[in-house]
Image (tube, rainbow, N blue to C red):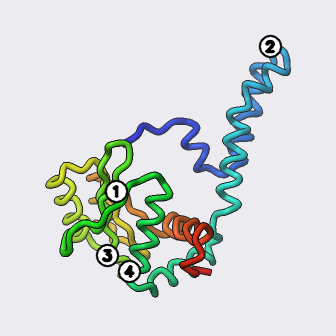
Amino acid sequence: MAKETLFSLLLRAPWWISILSAIPLFGAVQLFLPPLVALSATLPFLGIAAMAGWKQLRAPTPANVDEILGKLRAMSWENFSAVIAEAFRRDGYAVSPTGAGDAADFEATRNNRLTLVSCKRWKVAQTGIGPLRDLYEAKKTRDAQDCIYVAAGGFTDNAHDFALKNSIRLLCDGELAQLAARVERANHRWKLF
């Protein structure tokens, strides 16, 4: 897994956290250097604040998240899998389906890293450890670097623990709704709203 940086943490935090981080930096640098240099030292934080604010402005509200997840659950497998594949393509992956009956539904490759994606059980209310275990075994068998499990429902505590322990990314809730909304905005083929 990639190492967390201050900027990656700030990008996921509320936008105003970056502004609050820039203020003491400006004050400290201004003690030793001219104000223009102090201002330029804060520019990365201000840029992150703008990026985070833009992302948060475009993010679905909690009410929209529930609505989008409901609409995703109502989709046919063909439509749902097309939305997921398109979302990964938009994130720079080359996506191809795996064989029928496989634990993973897609192979997604980016920067010579193979990621297995499983999303066939997207409709279930709560996912247990079984499908995650199957995906993890497929990851080991195929020498994949990453694996992602997509679900519009929740996960049991055991499933969360297993995913954390074995570096399985769980794509669900608000993150899944935001991903689907991004695809819908770019391609009006799937009407989610």
Give whichever of discs 4 and 2 has the lower sequence position.
2
Give whichever of discs 2 and 1 has the lower sequence position.
2
How many residues crowd mark 4 within 10 Å: few (<14), some (14–19), many (20+)? few
Residue, x 61% and y 72% (percent of image)?
62
Q: Is 182 situated above or below 52? A: below
Residue 161 position in % (x across, y down): 30, 59
The answer to whether 95 appears left or right of 182 in the picture is left
Label at residue 120: 3
Give whichever of discs 4 and 3 has the lower sequence position.
4
Give the labeled residue for mark 2. 33
User: Which marked residue is nearer to the observer: mark 4 or mark 3?
Assistant: 4
Gap between marks 2 and 1, in whole Å?
48 Å
Give the labeled residue for mark 1. 108
The answer to whether 8 appears left or right of 80 in the picture is right
Three-letter amino acid code at the position of disc 3: Lys
Q: Is 37 situated above or below 173? A: above
Give the labeled residue for mark 4. 78
Quadrant for residue 164, please give it: bottom left
User: Which marked residue is nearer to the observer: mark 1 or mark 3?
Assistant: 1
Q: In the current view of this chain or complex, which residue is farthest to the left? A: 141
Q: Are discs 1 and 3 less than 8 Å apart at CB? A: no
Q: Are discs 1 and 4 less than 8 Å apart at CB? A: no
The quadrant of the rendering that contains the C terminus is: bottom right
Three-letter amino acid code at the position of disc 2: Leu
Q: Nearer the viewer, residue 46 or 105?
A: 105
Three-letter amino acid code at the position of disc 1: Ala
Residue, x 51% and y 83% (percent of image)?
70
